[in-house]
Amino acid sequence: MLFHAHSANAVGIWHPLFDHLTSVSRLAREFAVATPWADEARLSGLLHDLGKYRYSYQHYIRQVHDPTGHIEGWAGGRDKTHSTAGGLWPQQYPRKSFGPQG
């Protein structure tokens, strides 16, 4: 299954989740490069939509066709949320498990 960050846009193009996460991660690190938190910014970019890897979320965005993918405000339920997972992941796994990145 190819995971998507958002439903198809007006011309039918889907945004792959891996591409979205790596792009946001790269931008976050660039914005923070002059600070001591560049690595944390990179990691936050990778994790911010982690919950979109849930099959229930992928199934839902394929049905709803909302190009924003931000459905928490109007669609309730644990199977619809995507933003919480990325916040919980670092609490469950030590940062060192991610290894050094540049």
Image: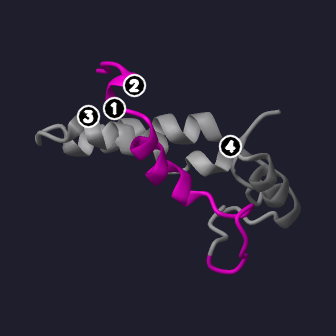
The residue nearer to you, when weighing 99 against 26, is: 99
Instruction: In the rendered structure, find residue 51 and report the number of the disc placed on it.
Output: none
Circle 3 is placed at which residue position? 39
Q: Amino acid at mark 4?
A: Tyr
Sequence order check: which comes first, mark 4 or mark 3?
A: 3
Quarter of the picture containing the N terminus is top right
Disc 3 crowd, CA 10 A, few/some/many (<14, 14-19, 20+): some
Disc 4 crowd, CA 10 A, few/some/many (<14, 14-19, 20+): some
**Residue 73 x %, y %:** 62, 79
Circle 1 is placed at which residue position? 95
Residue at 48% over, 34% down: 22
Disc 1 crowd, CA 10 A, few/some/many (<14, 14-19, 20+): few
Sequence order check: which comes first, mark 1 or mark 4?
A: 4
Is label 1 or label 4 in front?
A: 1
Residue 24 appearing in the image: no
Task: Give yes or no for contact between labels 2 and 3 (Cβ–Cβ under 8 Å).
Answer: no
Residue at 18% over, 41% down: 37
Q: Amino acid at mark 3?
A: Asp
Is label 2 or label 3 in front?
A: 2
- Secondary structure, mark 2, is helix
Residue at 37% over, 35% down: 26
Disc 2 crowd, CA 10 A, few/some/many (<14, 14-19, 20+): few
Query: Could you tell me how far apart the alpha carbons at marks 4 and 3 are, in whole angstroms?
Result: 23 Å
Circle 4 is placed at which residue position? 53
Sequence order check: which comes first, mark 2 or mark 3?
A: 3
Query: Residue lying farthest right?
Result: 63
Circle 2 is placed at which residue position? 98
**Residue 53 x %, y %:** 68, 43
Magenta segment, which residues? 73-102
